[in-house]
Amino acid sequence: MAGAIASAMLFGAPVHAQDSRLSLADRVSRLEQQAQSQNQGGTTLVNQVQALQSQLQQMQGQIEELQHQLQEANDKNKSQATDFDSRLGRLESGAGAANANAGNANPNNAPAANAAPPATPAAAGKPGAAPAAANANAQAAYDDAFKSLRAGDYVKSSRDFRNFIQQYPDSSLLPNAFYWLGESYYATSNYQVAMEAFQRLVSQFPQSEKVPDALLKVGYSQIELKQVDAGKATLKNVTAKYPGSKAAGLAQERLRRLQAQPAN
């Protein structure tokens, strides 16, 4: 009996050792697999970080481009507002002087010794009274259109200035009407129609004091319509033909901004 037990133990020992070795090999294999999985996970994480960094750089570039575009838009709006306000200020100053002169000739004031007597009803119907009435009507129509422009009602002001041009083609206010018609369209980004109004002023009334401003706005409109080369040429023409003018200064400023813009 004892011999049988000893024999069993003797032959059983190698089997137990073999099982131990196999178990250890399995454990090593599992450890290697775990290490490989961790390495793969680390590589994936590195790739993800690199992808996020690339996306962040792209977003930063887009943000810088948007900031640049916003700055350009702000500069453009400031330039347009300054130009528009200066035009209104000059026109208002002229209107104030005209009103002051009209006040000096008010019939409520004491008449001069050599003043003509008041017109009788019969005289009012004589030739010469009609042109005066027509001038008064033209002035009233012009003032009404300009009032809409100042109020920011550009649709009404453009309609009123068009009507004025049609109804009073011989008025001395016609050059100004063309200019403010162009401004009404320009303010609503109708650059093509605005440019046509400014060009009508330049071609039909080349001696008008509004020509430099109108030519400046032709250049602005061309640039807005992506006709950049033509716009630059027009602005250079303003600086050459009207040096020292406000329009020339604005043209030079716009040319500088165009020069500073990166090439597409």
Image (tube, rainbow, N blue to C red):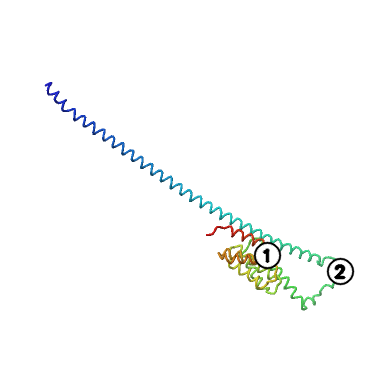
Residue 59 locus on image (x, y percent): 49, 50
The image quadrant of residue 165 is bottom right
Q: Amino acid at mark 1?
A: Phe
* Residue at image point 69% right, 60% down: 86
Judged from the image, the secondary structure of the residue bearing numbered disc 1 is helix
Q: Which residue is mark 1?
A: 146
Q: CA distance from mark 2 to mark 1?
A: 35 Å
Circle nearer the N terminus (2, 1): 2
Q: Quadrant of the N terminus?
A: top left
Judged from the image, the secondary structure of the residue bearing numbered disc 2 is loop
* Residue at image point 68% right, 65% down: 146
Residue 156 visible in the snapshot: no
Instruction: Give 75 or 264, whichever is nearer the viewer.
Output: 264
Residue 154 visible in the snapshot: yes
Residue 157 locus on image (x, y percent): 64, 65
* Residue that lies at the very extreme toward the bottom in this rendered image: 127
Please indicate whether residue 257 sits to the left or right of residue 35 in the image: right
Please indicate whether residue 261 sits to the left or right of residue 245 in the image: left
Q: Which residue is mark 2?
A: 112
The image quadrant of residue 118 is bottom right
Instruction: Give 187 or 232, whichever is nearer the viewer.
Output: 232
